Amino acid sequence: MRGKSVFTPVFSSRLAPVFSRYVDLKHSLGRGFDAPSRTLQSLDRFLYDHRATYPDLNAAAFEAWCHTHEHVASGVRRVRMLDVRSFCLYHRRTETQCFVPDLSSFPAYHQRIKPYIFSEAEVAKLLAAASSLERKPSWSVRPEVIRLGIALLFTTGIRRGELLALRLGDYNQHESTLHIRQTKFYKSRQLPINDSIVGEIDRCLRARTRRKLPVSSDTALIWNSSWGGGAYSGTSLGRCFRYLLQKCGIVTATGKWPRIHDARQRADSRIMPNLISNHSSGGARAVF
């Protein structure tokens, strides 16, 4: 069973023992806590490097540290500032006079990006375009793999990271399920899939077997032969998705490419039987 690695930061400032206890507490509660840990490590390094100017974490030190994050989006900066505030509230339990940032000084919340809702016709175009992707010696099953990835995103609602974490051993053909691991909330679940998706997975696996490509249980389902094999990265899959969007002429009302995450907003296994396209293997018409 593949476990999720936990990031363990190293602290050096005057507050290092408090930082360590706080992170250990979060880990003991079963939380990954990687991003907040990195934020606290950043603050710790700042306090250590500027210990002559800021011997302790106070309003001036916090403001100066925040200035070092002005290169990131305000929404990300707000989250990092909230991580520090949560730490300060923890610290105040034992040090009643310790500094706690004022929320009114934080960047405002931003409205979430409105998702793009794909039509059935657009999903069908993407599937057909994926089936017709160019084959190369190093990309011999690229059409089958990318088509499968798109089919899973649009029918199951899994996240991109969950899709790319899938291994062949997570697929149970007999029970028609996928074992989803390493989810956003660190829980595993059995995801039922319909016969159409089972057929797509089996076609992809047959294509890999015919070409004598890896089909062991620990091999990535969304397999990329580049750089010696392994799962597609989020960047590589996103780049391929944008290529298909461009090929199909699919853009938002503002002229931008939809995000791969938007596929989850359209995810519905019931729409797929209506999507019929020519398969690149033998020209058979697959209903899915």
Image (cartoon, rainbow, N blue to C red):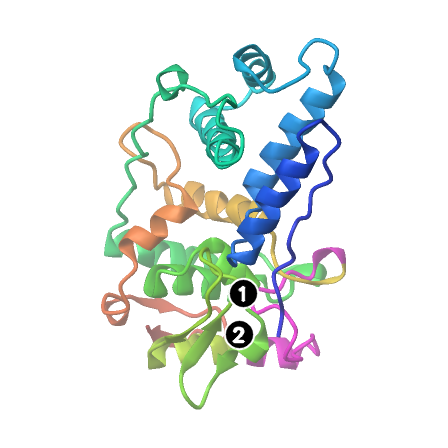
Residue 139 in percent (x, y) is at 65, 60
Q: Classify 286 as above or below 43.
A: below
Amino acid on which the number 1 mark rests in the picture: Val
Residues at circles 2 and 1 in contact by the CB criterion of under 8 Å: yes
* Residue bearing mark 1: 145
Question: How far apart are labels 2 and 1 at the CA level?
Answer: 6 Å
The secondary structure that most of the magenta stretch takes on is loop
Q: In screen coordinates, is 88 left or right of 256?
A: right
Residue corresponding to mark 2? 204
Q: Residues within 10 Å of mark 1 (few under 14, many from 20)?
A: many
Identify the magenta region.
204-227
Q: Secondary structure at mark 1?
A: helix
Q: Is residue 194 left or right of residue 279?
A: left
Write the residue at 54% across / 13% down. Answer: 63
Q: Is residue 60 magenta?
A: no
Q: Quadrant of residue 137?
A: bottom right
Q: Amino acid at mark 2?
A: Cys
